[in-house]
Image (cartoon, rainbow, N blue to C red):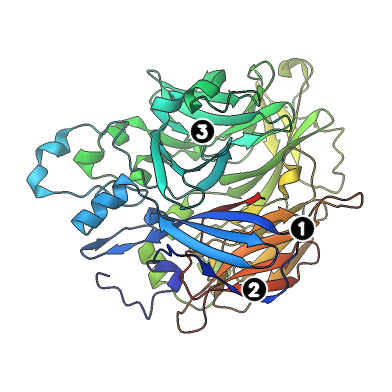
Amino acid sequence: MPGIDSKNVPRYLQNTEQVVDPEVAKFSGTIPHWLKGSLYASSPGVFDLENGSVNNWFDGYAIISKFEFDGRKVSFKSKYLQSNAHAKAVEAKRPVMQEFGTPPWSNSRKLFAKLIPFGPYDCTDNVVGTIFKLGSNLYTAGDTCYYHEIDPTTLSTLRTHHTMKTFGMNSISSQPLEDAAGNVYLVGGAIQPTFRYSVLKMPASAGKDKPLEKRFSTIASFPSRWMFGACPCRNFGMTENYIIMIEMPLVLNLMKLAATYVKGYCSTDWLDWRPEDGVRFYLIHKGSGNVVKTEVFSKLPFFTPSVINAFEEGNEIVLDVISMPNLDCNNATSLHNLRNRSDSQIPPENRPLDAGSIHRYIIPLLTRPLTQYPEGESLLKSSPFSSYKTVQATRTGERLIITPEILSDPGLGMDLQVINPNYRGKRYTFVYTTAGYMSTTFSPFANGIAKLNLETKVVTQWKVRPGCVPSEPVFVPAPETNESTEDDGILLTIVKMERAYEEDDFLVVVDAKSMTELGRAHLNSQVAGWYHATFFQG
């Protein structure tokens, strides 16, 4: 590694070797007998090459991991994502393509190439994001215009797809959502010639033998607020009847994107933070495709890395998000900042960023035009959440202004979260969360997993000692019985050691109801701390 002192760099910020031959873990404790299936994870795996390093944690060249459970044992394997970006970097022994925080390599032998506008097929295909299935096929996607099909057994990259060729979109959300009927939805955006958002649907009845472009259709399309820019389509919420898209004041500036080669821009340079423009919420009816005409805006601007869940309660939509007041997180995930910070606890006044907290918005579904309602009067009279103090929805001119209930203390670093997947789109009570790597020096959730009751705001935790850093938890529901409750199930996460000499990494199994540890799967192999992971039963 170029000039990297591995003894002083936390292990989760070092390169991870792939494990092609499966390793059977040494398990201490108890594995639930019903835990049978596969957990797939996407992680940054390679940060440093012989002649250069990437600049951001999210820029690490992706590695796909698989844990297989059969009720008695746990096995592990991993493989680098076979992307064009990684292949070019290996050949050049340094990063070559534009990444989230890494600019394209300025090669003096190719000065003319710098004058070429950056096109829709020039983006990196290095994907550190989500793992999902469409039909029986396994895919990984992230914040780029490429997605990859993965062999579920060997973890080899089977095919690389571009969203423009498949969906006619310059980008799509990295996590499809499936409703109770088996229909799958995506949100994407395209330049036509100005930017438009679209909602795509793959019906449950779509023929699985057809290519993806034949299975999805557009049910809604509407323009961005900005003539030469748009909010990246990262994620969205879904209830029984509605898709909810959040248009943050985070604007992908198309002029900056086109100048990538000339200016040496990375992806973060394309983004303009315009808090004065506010956050707009679009409600799209799943059945008709109609976009609700009411202009719904948040009272305060925010950035959300993820929508937790959404559901309908009476004539209202409840929407929960991870909320950050600015884009400090982009700088906080730079490798330089992560590798050079102090290991000591950072007092609140000196924290390097405003980290995530959980906010709940309630949006009334109005039965008549907004202008027929009096200004300043609460429109949430039927809300069942009587203990809430700040949640609000009022008319201000021709806009519906919504104020959230803050469900977790601001700035504590709730960055990565999961719920019982059987409760997506439904009323639910619990969310499980940990802190991202950018928050490990101050967040009380950095060395464990927190369980937050969304109605009482009470937090319970599973904790490990300082120096142990868990990744995003994965909720696996227990087999259903007549007495099943929402928190019947287990949580799985990989725990990385800050220092290699302390002990090996391990996968932990935590009871989601009591938040007590059931067991650990110890591995001799390196395991990358994952960004997102998904469990598939069977």
Please name the residue shown 54% across and 61% down the image.
Answer: 436
Looking at the picture, tell me which residue is in the foreground, 265 or 45: 45
Rendered view: 122 above or below 330: above
Rendered view: 157 above or below 113: below
**What's the amino acid at mark 2?**
Arg
Rendered view: 446 above or below 253: below
Image coordinates of residue 155 in percent, x first then y, are: 46, 52
Residue 489, disc: 1
**What's the amino acid at mark 3?**
Asp
Residue 458, disc: none
The reply to whether residue 444 is in sight is: no
- Dot 2 surroundings within 10 Å: few (below 14), some, or many (20 or more)? many
Q: Residue beneath label 2, please?
A: 520
Mark positioned earlier in the residue sequence (2 or 3): 3
Q: Residue furthest bottom?
A: 501
Looking at the picture, tell me which residue is in the foreground, 111 or 186: 186
